[in-house]
Amino acid sequence: MIGNIRTFLDDVKVEMKKVTWPTMTQTKGSTVVVILTVIMIGVYFGVIDFFLSKLIHLFLG
């Protein structure tokens, strides 16, 4: 059992050395894209929700 865990952790260490990590500039750029996308989608759904709620209130009184 302990041997299997040790082997697993050794394999994880080997695989982590193969990973190419993004630079800080790439990470910041990706973060900005994600934040802007979330804001745009939030505004879109907010506008749709507003108009649909006005439409429902119009029909239901």
Image (tube, rainbow, N blue to C red):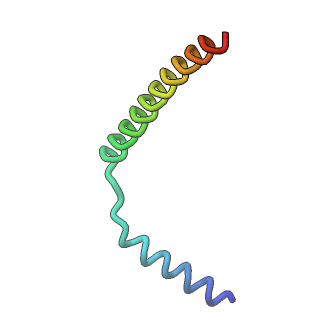
- The residue drawn where x is 66% and y is 14% is 60
Where does residue 29 sit, x and y in percent of width and height? 32, 41
Q: Quadrant of the N terminus?
A: bottom right
- Give the side of residue 5 with respect to residue 23, left or right: right
Where does residue 31 sit, x and y in percent of width and height? 40, 40
- The residue drawn where x is 36% and y is 41% is 28
Q: Nearer the viewer, residue 19 or 42?
A: 42
- The residue drawn where x is 36% and y is 43% is 30
Where does residue 49 sit, x and y in percent of width and height? 54, 23
Q: Quadrant of the C terminus?
A: top right
- In the picture, residue 18 is in which quadrant? bottom left
Residue located farthest toward the front when viewing the structure as drawn: 59
- Give the side of residue 33 with respect to residue 13, left or right: left
The answer to whether residue 51 is above or below residue 3 is above
The answer to whether residue 18 is above or below residue 4 is above
The answer to whether residue 57 is above or below residue 6 is above
- The residue drawn where x is 59% and y is 84% is 6
- In the picture, residue 36 is in which quadrant? top left
Q: Nearer the viewer, residue 58 or 20?
A: 58
